């Protein structure tokens, strides 16, 4: 079976910001990690291109909605994922026929099963969320919005809508959903998010309006072309249509359902309530896990275009580099919790952990192999307790990183485990003082020096494998510097489980001092 991981598909009402990239990076690292386990992996991302919000944004820009979507996808979304080295297997767009045709078939099937009926609805609607809100969810406006009711997420006034709709019998699935949550406690993560969803469902569910008749930018309802399918029903189905629903039975059977849906916490209810209910209604299996990441905060505000704190990822990669960018957000913020971003914190962590700890370790080890052994990796023949401690430390680091990242989605914990090992190796060099041992030219002294440098280089070999899912460019540079491509093969072919097996890098390998992995930062731009 295939390990199937997804991101949300993102609205193309504007260019991507750090919040979009954060979820996508987490999915990319997870997918890369499972590939390094030797698993068959399918990683899906894409764009959500229907709905009233897209239509209005396109109109404000003087173009049609399809032209607007094409422009954003081709000029902003896909280039950014390439820039960040996002290794997705597929990129689905909800305007593609492979999606729209299957959406109509899925909804028609629900209608034929009696799961959809016609009715009317009136209530407060947030265009930003593309969702009717319950009156109790709204907040009171202040300032320019005084006297109005606002969406708690977008903090903009809701619109009172009244229209004829088709409804999905969502209320009928409350008990089945609660039973599933109880039988599968890891279905929704983190626990705080799970508790929120469970409490919401326990209060009772309303049937879901699954069509709109006040605009036409969407997938037509197959039995009534005066309606288009509600954008969230359309969007959620991408997880099925992209892997062959009703089109490629073999691909669908081996891939669906997703092992992990990674989503922002503001869209958790759609994924943890509506999506599984739709699947239950159509007799399809439910995903393994729905993991909600927290919000990225700048100045105490959620990062988004609507509150003007949307920072372009390229603003950071141009200063820190792509690999440091990939590393920072997963290292600095516990996945599932809100986290604050600042230039100062990024700069401090870059200097301390990347440049001083990791980069300096790689530079001095490869330089010393060149200086003392002419660039040929020596053999370790004088192994003692100090070296055994490094062997044991690596074994622990591999096991912990693999469990935390691959199983628990604790990216921060996994990265910390690897960098704890980096600190251990740095401490080992400080204690063993190879620069002093090098002055002893006796056979015993040379054997000791060889053992110290082999131990450090072999540690770097394992570190390159472990950090490859997080920082692929840097790991490739280190792999080449260690001569591992020649002696062990491509970095992409290395396995996480084998990375802790001591002695894989053979003596005699040619080691070269490459470029500095993490160059000294220039002065940060004014913010």
Image: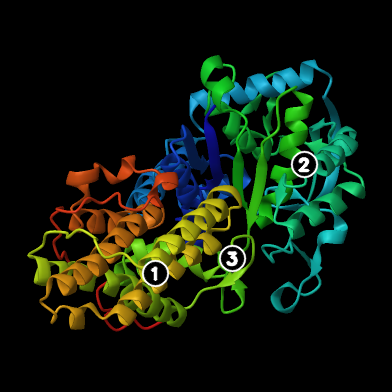
**Residue 232: % across, % down:** 67, 40
* Camera-nearest residue between 124 and 486: 486
On the question of residue 214 being in view, the answer is yes
Q: Residues within 10 Å of mark 1 (few under 14, many from 20)?
A: few
| Residue occupying the point 34% across, 43% down | 494
Q: Looking at the rendered structure, which numbered label has been put on residue 334?
A: 3
Q: Dividing the image into 4 quarters, which one contains the N terminus?
A: top right
Q: Farthest residue to the right: give it.
A: 203
Q: Is residue 438 left or right of residue 478?
A: left
Q: Is residue 513 left or right of residue 229?
A: left
Q: Residues within 10 Å of mark 3 (few under 14, many from 20)?
A: some
Q: Quadrant of residue 510?
A: bottom left
**Residue 93: % across, % down:** 49, 36
State the residue position of label 2: 184
- Looking at the rendered structure, the secondary structure element under dot 3 is loop
- Looking at the rendered structure, the secondary structure element under dot 1 is helix
**Residue 52: % across, % down:** 62, 45
- Work out whether mark 3 precedes mark 1 in sequence or the reverse, and give the earlier one: 3
- Work out whether mark 2 precedes mark 1 in sequence or the reverse, and give the earlier one: 2
- Looking at the rendered structure, the secondary structure element under dot 2 is loop
**Residue 426: % across, % down:** 34, 75
* Camera-nearest residue between 35 and 227: 35
Q: Looking at the rendered structure, which numbered label has been put on residue 385?
A: 1
Q: Dividing the image into 4 quarters, which one contains the C terminus?
A: bottom left
Cα distance between the residues tagged 3 and 1: 35 Å
| Residue occupying the point 50% across, 42% down | 47
Cα distance between the residues tagged 2 and 3: 23 Å
Q: Quadrant of residue 374?
A: bottom left
Q: Nearer the viewer, mark 2 or mark 1?
A: 1
């Amino acid at each position: 079976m295939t390990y199937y991981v997804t991101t949300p598909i993102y609205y193309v009402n504007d260019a991507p910001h750090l919040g979009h990239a954060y979820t996508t990076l987490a999915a990319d690292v997870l997918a890369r990690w499972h590939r390094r386990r030797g698993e068959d992996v399918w990683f899906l991302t894409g764009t959500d291109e229907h709905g009233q919000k897209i239509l209005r944004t396109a109109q404000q820009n003087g173009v049609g909605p399809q032209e607007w979507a094409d422009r954003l996808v081709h000029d902003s979304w896909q280039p950014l994922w390439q820039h960040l080295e996002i290794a997705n297997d597929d990129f689905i767009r909800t305007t593609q026929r492979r999606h729209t045709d299957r959406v109509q078939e899925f909804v028609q099937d629900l209608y034929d099963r009696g799961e959809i009926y016609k009715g009317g609805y009136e209530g407060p609607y947030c265009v930003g969320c593309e969702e009717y809100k319950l009156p109790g969810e709204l907040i009171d406006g202040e300032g320019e919005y005084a006297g109005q009711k606002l969406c708690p997420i977008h903090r903009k006034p809701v619109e009172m809508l009244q229209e004829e709709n088709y409804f999905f019998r969502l209320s009928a699935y409350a008990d089945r959903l609660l039973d599933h949550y109880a039988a599968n406690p890891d279905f929704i993560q983190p626990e705080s998010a799970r508790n929120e969803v469970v409490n919401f469902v326990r209060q009772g569910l309303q049937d879901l309006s699954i069509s709109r008749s006040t605009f036409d930018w969407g997938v037509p309802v197959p039995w009534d072309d005066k309606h288009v399918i509600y954008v969230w029903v359309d969007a959620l189905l991408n997880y099925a249509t992209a892997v062959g629903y009703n089109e490629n039975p073999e691909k669908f059977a081996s891939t669906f359902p997703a092992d992990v849906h990674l989503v922002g916490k503001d869209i958790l209810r759609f994924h943890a309530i509506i999506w599984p209910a739709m699947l239950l209604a159509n007799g399809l299996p439910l995903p393994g896990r729905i993991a909600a990441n927290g919000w990225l905060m700048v100045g105490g505000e959620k990062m988004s275009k609507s509150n003007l704190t949307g920072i372009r990822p390229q603003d950071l990669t141009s200063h820190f580099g792509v690999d440091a960018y990939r590393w920072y957000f997963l290292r600095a913020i516990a996945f599932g919790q809100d986290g604050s971003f600042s230039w100062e914190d990024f700069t401090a962590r870059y200097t301390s952990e990347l440049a001083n700890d990791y980069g300096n370790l790689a530079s001095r080890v490869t330089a010393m192999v060149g200086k003392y052994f002419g660039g040929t990796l020596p053999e370790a023949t004088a192994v003692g307790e100090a070296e055994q401690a490094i062997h044991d430390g690596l074994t622990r680091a591999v096991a912990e990183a693999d469990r935390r990242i691959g199983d628990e989605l604790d990216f921060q914990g996994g990265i910390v485990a690897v960098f704890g090992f980096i600190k251990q190796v740095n401490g080992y060099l400080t204690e063993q003082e190879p620069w002093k041992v090098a002055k002893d030219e006796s056979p015993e002294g040379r054997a000791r020096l060889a053992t110290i440098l082999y131990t450090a280089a072999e540690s770097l070999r394992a570190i390159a494998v472990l950090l490859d899912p997080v920082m692929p460019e840097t790991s490739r540079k280190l792999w080449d510097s260690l001569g591992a491509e020649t002696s062990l093969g491509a970095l992409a072919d290395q396995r996480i489980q084998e990375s802790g097996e001591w002695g894989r890098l053979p003596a005699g390998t040619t080691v070269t001092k490459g470029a500095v992995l993490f160059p000294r930062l220039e002065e940060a731009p004014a913010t």
